[in-house]
Amino acid sequence: MQQTFDITRTSRKLLSQFLEKHTLEQLNAIPEGFNNNLIWNIAHIVVVQQMLVYKLSGLPMMISDEMVDKYKKGSKPEHDATQAEADEIKELLLKTIDQTETDFENKMFENYQQYPTSTGFTLNNAGDAMSFNYFHEGIHLGVILSIKKYI
């Protein structure tokens, strides 16, 4: 599991740099041909990890229900994110992974509701969810790099 957390942290540090190096206007821009923006993709990554690991384990998530509604699968940007939201997302990028690793070490993930992903993988436990999560983050990092070319 350590390598899974190391890979995820590397991904999250790269994502954090997008939040640091782009203006709020750039983060909120939706280029022609895209359905979302940089900040939506970054927040979506945080939300999906929490849902796949915590919610499906029957544990409380570290994010608000409002954040879930704004950035879950099938959602799209309905408003421009504020600086306060961008700051919160940046903080959650690493905070959620650090806490997830601690919770794995403390064996918090005993129950898991099996989940078939839209990409054809079936997640049977929280370990599967974390492994799938970095695949999911890679997909969205690719989208982010594509959007970056147009802003």
Image: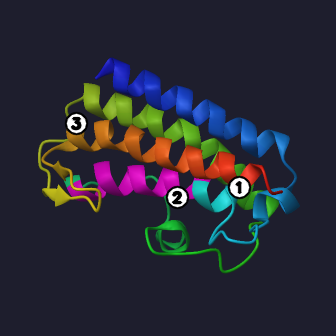
Residue name at image x 19 percent, y 32 percent: 107
Marks 3 and 2 in Cβ contact (< 8 Å)? no
Q: Earlier in the sequence, mark 2 or mark 1?
A: 2
Q: Amino acid at mark 1?
A: Ile
Any magenta on residue 20? no
**Secondary structure at numbered mark 1:** helix
Q: Nearer the viewer, mark 2 or mark 1?
A: 1
Going from the N terminus, do you reach mark 3 or mark 2 first? 2
Mark 3 lies on residue: 127
Q: Is residue 41 visible?
A: yes
SS class of the residue under badge 2? helix
Magenta-drawn stretch contains 54? yes
Q: Which residues are magenta?
A: 42-56
Whether residue 125 sits left or right of residue 61 in the image: it is left
Q: Dot 2, how many residues are within 10 Å of its Cα: few (below 14), some (14-19), or many (20+)? A: many
Residue drawn 64% across the image and 74% down it: 77
Q: Which mark is residue 44?
A: 2
